[in-house]
Amino acid sequence: MSKIENATFVDVADDALAAIDACYENGWTDGLPVVPPEQSRVEAMLDMEGRPPETIIATHPTTGLECSLLAAAVNAVMAGCLPEYFPTVVAALEAANEADYNYHGSAASTGGSCQLLIVSGPVVNDIGMNAAGNTFGPGNRANATIGRAMRLVLLNVFRMTPAIADQSTQGHPGKYTMCIAERQESNPWAPLHEEFGFGPDISSVTVFAGSGFCNVENHGGNSPEAILDCIADSMANLGCITSGQSVVVLSPEHAAIIASQGWTKAAVGEYLFETAKQPVDTMKRVQKFVPREYEAQGREDMHRGMTPDDILITVAGGDAGGHSAFIPSWSRTRASIMQTKPIGVCIDC
């Protein structure tokens, strides 16, 4: 049981607790107990895929280590996934495998990014994901275990071990798991899976190398500007502002206020981009001024991101409460670009 990427199965017939301890002894955990990868559970996971188990779905660009469907299934079992979650895990791994995502840099850097997954489309209801209250928090098996499967693949297959290959300065809890679902029924605009061109019946998952979560509170604002100014201020704080991408998750309450006055999602992105900025002198004073990025932006101040398209906007959360979220990218430069894949669709077959 020394190499999880070779899909060694664990026999739990005699002593389940001993099998859990064996997973610890082999270094297969994220610090929390895992479900021992018993063969029948792994096979049930693979039954959700139409391709051979040896199919490679992701490759670590620095070490050359490969993740097969079989290895992904083993780690999905250990994370606690049900078989019906596996197509989402596979799509997320294929998204992270795109070169622009920068699988190695986003996992190895001192910035300490997590793999934020945003799931959109019919699969959200099909597998019982939580898109409503506490969507970033605990309590939902699908949300928690799909995100955790991604982290276990990084640890067990790609050997991104904390304090060895993973040089995160501080890290954050999202590195255990960070997977949310878009709340389509409360979204006044087109859902992400349609925005990305997959149509109403095909779900999608977006993978973003994100830093720590920033809660944006405004209970009193009753205009788009009042709410978006608070979000833009969070995006442009000196600790966060870079040329990197951003994820903004609007609560249903905030989204309803913004949309009620006719604002499109494109208008929201444009406003946030134009407002989330710092003067050049301030950026120079704190030694975060990047001349080539400032020149590429072509504006008087330095803005977060390069264009409005660098801001992904979605809707999730409970019905009540003026709380939205901003998740910054992990790097001060554009070292990772978020990627989106359809779920359960084999594009390259």
Image: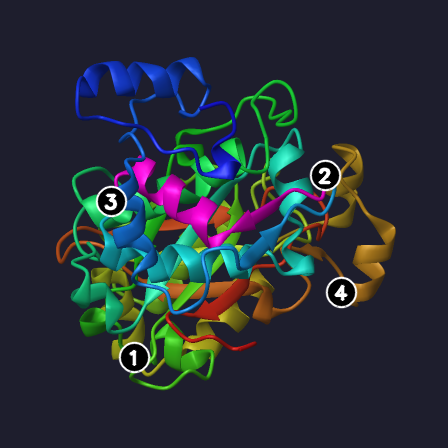
The earlier-in-sequence mark between 4 and 3 is 3
For the residues labelled 3 and 2, the Cα–Cα distance comes to: 31 Å
4 and 3 marks in contact (CB < 8 Å): no
Mark 1 or 3, nearer chain start: 3
Q: In this view, does 48 lie above or below 10?
A: below
Type of the residue with mark 2 = Thr
Residue at image mark 1: 261
Any magenta on residue 66?
Answer: yes
Residue at (65%, 33%) from the top-left corner? Answer: 108
Colouring chosen for the image of the structure: rainbow
Image: magenta residue range: 63-81
Q: Distance between the residues labelled 4 and 2?
A: 35 Å
Mark 1 crowdedness (10 Å alpha carbons): few <14, some 14-19, many ≥20: few
Q: Can you tell which quarter of the image residue 339 is in?
A: bottom right
Q: Nearer the viewer, residue 25 or 109?
A: 25
The reply to whether the C-beta atoms of the residues labelled 2 and 1 are less than 8 Å apart is: no
Report the residue marked by disc 3: 40
Q: Position of residue 209 (x, y in %)?
A: 55, 47
Mark closest to the chain's N terminus, 1 or 4: 1
Give the residue type that dot 4 points to.
Gln
* Quarter location, residue 121: bottom left
| Circle 1 or circle 4, nearest the eye | 4
Left-right relation of 14 to 310 = left
Give the mark, 4 or 2, whose residue is nearer the N terminus: 2
Q: Nearer the viewer, residue 50 or 63?
A: 50
Mark 2 or mark 1: name the one nearer the start of the chain: 2
Residue 205 place in picture, x, y as percent: 41, 63
Disc 4 residue crowd, few under 14, some 14–19, many 20+, Cα 10 Å: some
Give the total of numbered labels.
4
- Residue on which disc 2 sits: 63
